[in-house]
Image (tube, rainbow, N blue to C red):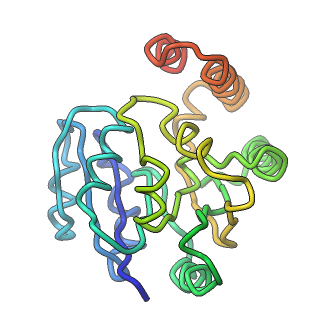
């Protein structure tokens, strides 16, 4: 297959990064773009011989810088609190072998590391969002050929909604759901509650679509 590179933006990600890297380390080149962690994040990345770059703490900027390190082939953008389930590499290969795959963007099925009823309900809502609105988020991972990434202008150096911004530049017919789970940590949802966090994320999405400034949206997002 064409060379696969995985970009992982991090910021104080020591609790989850090892699981994230361990699931993919043998199948791709790993780039960790850190936003100035003060914990053992970079030590963990170095232990796995990932290629580490340090930049300012802005996920859009981190993803942009990571993508700039890759000159060709396929790029998978993977959040540091998410790990791919077994079989991911085989399904990625199947996607890549599809006709005109270099003109498509793949994303994975969203899952929590929590089997509670409310977690499963949020997962269903995410699935419906993707089916109805063709709007996968970054925590579902995005797999894209570097040529297409360059063509659509790549990530913008913004601290929030960088994934929504990128997806908005991709035609719906060019999005493809890869049948493997991207399993995301539920800790952020549990901290303030699934309902509150889901509604807050929806409000932030609507604000972004209505043209509110990223700075103002981030104030709401961080609340």
Q: Position of residue 153 (x, y in %)?
A: 43, 47
Residue at figure coordinates x 40%, y 65% from the top left: 146
Side of 160 where 71 appears, left or right: left
Q: Nearer the viewer, residue 96 or 195?
A: 96
Side of 78 where 189 appears, left or right: right
Taking 11 as reference, is 102 above or below it?
Answer: below
Side of 117 where 2 appears, left or right: left
Side of 55 where 154 appears, left or right: right
Q: How many marks?
A: 0
Residue at figure coordinates x 31%, y 38% from the top left: 61
Q: In the orientation shown, which residue stands out farthest toward the front?
A: 151
Taking 29 as reference, is 97 above or below it?
Answer: below
Q: Position of residue 68 (x, y in %)?
A: 26, 54
Q: Position of residue 111 (x, y in %)?
A: 65, 56
Q: Position of residue 123 (x, y in %)?
A: 74, 49
Q: Nearer the viewer, residue 206 or 37?
A: 206
Residue at figure coordinates x 17%, y 36% from the top left: 38
Residue at figure coordinates x 46%, y 29% from the top left: 160
Quadrant, the N terminus: bottom left
Taking 17 as reference, is 196 above or below it?
Answer: above
């Amino acid at each position: 297959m064409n060379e696969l590179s995985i970009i992982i933006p991090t910021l104080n990600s020591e609790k989850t990064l090892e699981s994230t890297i361990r699931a993919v380390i043998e199948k791709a080149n790993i780039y960790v773009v850190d936003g100035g962690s003060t914990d053992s994040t970079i030590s963990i990345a170095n232990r796995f011989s990932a290629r580490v770059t340090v930049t300012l703490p802005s996920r859009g900027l981190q993803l942009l810088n990571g993508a700039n390190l890759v000159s060709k082939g396929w790029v998978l953008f993977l959040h540091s609190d998410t790990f791919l389930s077994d079989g991911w590499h085989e399904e990625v290969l199947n996607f890549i072998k599809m006709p005109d795959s270099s003109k498509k963007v793949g994303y994975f099925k969203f899952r929590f590391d929590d089997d509670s009823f409310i977690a499963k309900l949020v997962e269903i809502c995410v699935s419906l969002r993707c089916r109805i609105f063709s709007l996968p988020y970054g925590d579902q991972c995005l797999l894209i050929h570097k040529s297409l990434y360059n063509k659509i202008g790549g990530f913008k150096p913004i601290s929030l909604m960088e994934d929504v911004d990128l997806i908005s530049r991709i035609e719906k017919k060019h999005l493809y759901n890869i049948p493997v789970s991207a399993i995301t940590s539920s800790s952020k949802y549990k901290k303030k509650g699934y309902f509150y966090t889901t509604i807050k994320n929806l409000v932030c999405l609507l604000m972004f679509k209505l043209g509110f400034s990223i700075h103002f949206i981030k104030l709401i997002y961080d609340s």
